[in-house]
Amino acid sequence: MGGETTPSQTVGPYFSIGLGWLNRGDLARGASSGERVTVRGRILDGEGQPVPDACIEIWQADADGKYARPEDPQENSPAQGFLGFGRTPTNDRGEFSFTTIKPGSVPGPHGRPQAPHLEISVFMRGLLRRLVTRLYFPNDPANAEDHVLNLVPAGRRATLIARSVAEDPRVLEWDIRLQGEHETVFFEC
Amino acid sequence: MLRYRRPAPGTQPELLHPPYVSSIKRAPTQPLIQLPHTLSETTGPSFSKEIVPPKGFDLTRQHKGEPLGERIVVSGRLMDEEGRPIAHSLVEIWQANAAGRYLHKADQHDAPLDPNFTGMGQTLTDEEGRYRFVTIRPGAYPWRNHYNAWRPRHIHFSVFGPAFATRLVTQMYFPGDPLLEFDPIYNSVPVESARKRLISIFDWATTTPEIALGFRFDIVLRGRNATPMER
C-alpha cells in the first residue's frame, strides 16, 4: 500500500538544528571543469525586509550538463566527487551565498536543450511548502530559447536571471523577493 | 522520461494560510507557474552512508548522559504512491526536548535545555525503504502566533526521495494530541484525510519491553506518471 502523498509542513524557525549539519556552500568541489561563479543575494519578504531564517537548496548538472545521479541516462558520467547539491542558510541580514560552476545544457522537452540553470528550493518559517524556482545565467544566448523562461510572462523573466557584478565577472547577484513589484517567479514543481 | 504526478487538490497546504500569521508576508502573491518535468526535476541528490554519522539515528546517545523524557522509537517506511519502497534515501529530523525547548538561540521559551539532548537526527532508509530513530517524546511549547498558541508535540522530517520533484519537509504528530485541532500549521492542509496522514500511529510491534514506546510514521512521496513525455 502507498496512498496519497504526505502533506508538506513548514520547516519552522529552528530548522538549523536538523539541516545545518549538511550545509554546503561550495558546489564546485569535485568538479573537474567548468566556469567558477559565486552567487550572492538576499531573501526579502513582503515588506522588503530581509529574511534571516531561510535556507535554500541547489540542484544542478555539471559543466557537461550531466547530473550526478544514476537515473540520468546521458552518457559520460560527471567527475567523481561532483555532487551537484548545495544547501545554504541566510544570515542575520537575510543574505546567502554559494560558489559553484556554471552547468552545461541539459536536455528539455522534445529533446531541445535547456539554457544552463540551477534548480532552487526555498525553505523558511511561514512557508507551508517549499518554494521552487530556477536561476539562469546573464547574457547566455540560450536563455532566449529556453522553454521554461518562455512559459514566464516576459516582464517577470528578469527575476530568474542573475545579474553580473561589474567589478568581478566571477560574482553574480540574485535576490529572492517573496512578494511585491519584483516578486520572483516561483513554480509548481 | 517519466514525470511525477501533481498532488490531488486540497492534499497539500495552501501557501497563504492567514491563520498561520508568518505566511502573510512570506507566501508569494503571484500564481505559481507549472514547471514541466525535465531531467532537472526527475533527478535529485543522493547521499552515501559515509556522510551519515553512525549515531545519527539515536538521539538519546549523542551525549555523555541520557536525555530526560519519555524514550520512544519512531520508525516507518519511505515509499511512493504505489507503495514502492524508496531505498537508501536520506531522512533528517529535528525536534524540541521533553520540556518543549529547542537548542536554538531564537527559542526563548522559559523551559530548561537538556545538556544531553541536541534534537537532531539523520539516517538512510534501508533496501525496503525503512528508517528507524530512537529519541524522546518532544514537549508541546507556546508560540506567539495568536493568544495562548501552543504547538502540538511534533518532530520535523526532511526527506529527499529520488528526485528534485520529490523533496519534502513535513512534521510528524502524535495520536490523540488535544492541541491538533487548534494548530494552524497542522490545519493548513484542507482535506482532513490528508491531514491525518501527518499523525503517527502507536505501534506495539516496535514498542520495546522496558525500553520505549513505538510510533510508526510512513512517508509517501509523489508517484510517477506512466505516461511518456510528449515527443
Image (spheres, coloured by chain):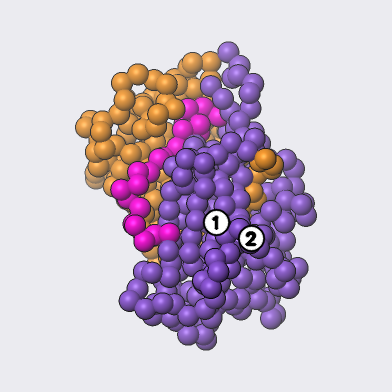
Q: The purple chain is which one?
A: B
Residue hosting label 1? B75
**Quadrant in which residue B152 is drawn:** bottom right
Q: Residue furthest right?
A: B192
Q: Main secondary structure of the magenta part?
A: loop
Residue B203 badge: 2
Q: Are marks 1 and 2 on the same chain?
A: yes
Q: Which chain is orange?
A: A
Give left or right: position of B125 versus B230: left
Q: Which amino acid does label 1 sit on?
A: Ser
In the foreground, A86 or B80 = B80
Give left or right: position of B81 versus A178: right
Q: Give the range drawn in magenta.
A: B36-57
Q: Quadrant of the C terminus of chain B?
A: top right
In the foreground, B57 or B184 = B57
Residue at 67% in and 76% down? B149
Residue B189 visible within the image: no
Give left or right: position of A131 versus B64: right
Residue A76 in percent (x, y) is at: 31, 21
